[in-house]
Amino acid sequence: MLKLEVNNLYKNFGGLQVLRDVTFEVNGPELIGLIGPNGAGKTTLTNILDGAIKPSSGTVYLNDKRVDTLPPYMVARAGLGRTFQVTRAFRRMTVLENLLVPAMALHATGRQNFEAKAREVLDFLTMSHLTNEYGRALSGGQQKLLELGRLLMLDPSLIILDEPFAGVHPRLMEVIYEYIHRVNSDGKAIIIISHDMDTIFTLSKRLLVLNYGDLIADGDPQIVKNDPLVKRAYLGEDEEEG
Ligand SMILES: Nc1ncnc2c1ncn2[C@@H]1O[C@H](COP(=O)(O)OP(=O)(O)OP(=O)(O)O)[C@@H](O)[C@H]1O
Ligand SMILES: [Mg+2]
């Protein structure tokens, strides 16, 4: 069963402290929302978890293996997959190739081993008709779907989705909802970062709130929503007044 342990993470960029003593665990196939104002440190946290940047201090363990010291491809091999807030489809490769390349790179084996799976993934994402289109021909929303597909090719046990719904057409949002539910019931843990409160409260079973570097809440979404600290810091309600 998946276990992520995040222990006392700090991150400074020069004089700017972006994360301060962030500690939490993920146990098993949880479905977690991560919210916080612009600049709260959500993407920075994701970048540390996937190995793209190193914390100033603190540790991260994935299934009892220390990963904060590893490069991203090794963290991916250990079972963590993430998408990017700004999508990164390969523009001069076809949709099918976009799916095959990361899987082949990670497992260092040939294309034939992954092609059937890639076609299944495209079918699931309602993108089969785009199999031979170039990455550059896709809409923003389709590129987001393609990134979700690339994750499935790597079969991670924990997935972090950084703003998967931003700028996505409502029809594609449905596909992403379905993806999240299916992948989660397949036994994968998912952390969803979003500013879309309706979506976050609909989807997540647990909510983490980052407020300028501090993890100020972690728990049941309905309880977190009514936490005075969260209301004041994030939801913009000032119940002290009046
Ligand atoms: N490489 C970097 N160098 C310097 N400062 C950075 C760097 N990356 C992020 N920051 C700063 O760290 C803070 C947190 O940024 P981060 O992108 O993690 O926030 P976020 O919660 O993802 O925000 P958003 O909701 O807008 O995506 C911001 O003040 C940002 O400007
Ligand atoms: Mg961000």
Image (spheres, rainbow, N blue to C red):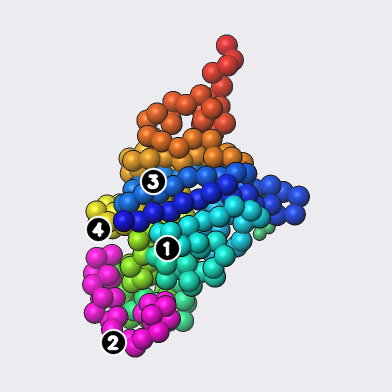
| Tag 2 secondary structure | helix
**Which residue position holds label 3?**
32
Residue 120 position in % (x across, y down): 23, 72
Residue lying farthest to the front in this orientation: 64
Measured in 3D between alpha carbons, the distance from the residue under mark 1 to the one under mark 2, in whole angstroms, is 24 Å
| Tag 4 secondary structure | loop
Residue 230 position in % (x across, y down): 51, 30
Tag 1: residue type? Leu
**Which residue position holds label 1?**
80
**Which residue position holds label 4?**
186
120 sits to left or right of 173 = left
- The magenta segment: 100-126
Indicate which disc, 3 or 2, sits on the residue closer to the N terminus.
3
Tag 2: residue type? Gln
Quarter of the image where one finds residue 156: bottom left
- Relative to 82, say whether 107 is above or below: below
Front residue of 2/114: it is: 2
4 and 3 marks in contact (CB < 8 Å): no
Category of crowding for the residue at label 3, using alpha-carbon neighbours closer than 10 angstroms: few (below 14), some (14–19), many (at least 20): many
**Which residue position holds label 2?**
112
Q: Residue at x 50, y 50 (%)?
A: 6
> Nearer the observer, disc 2 or disc 4?
4
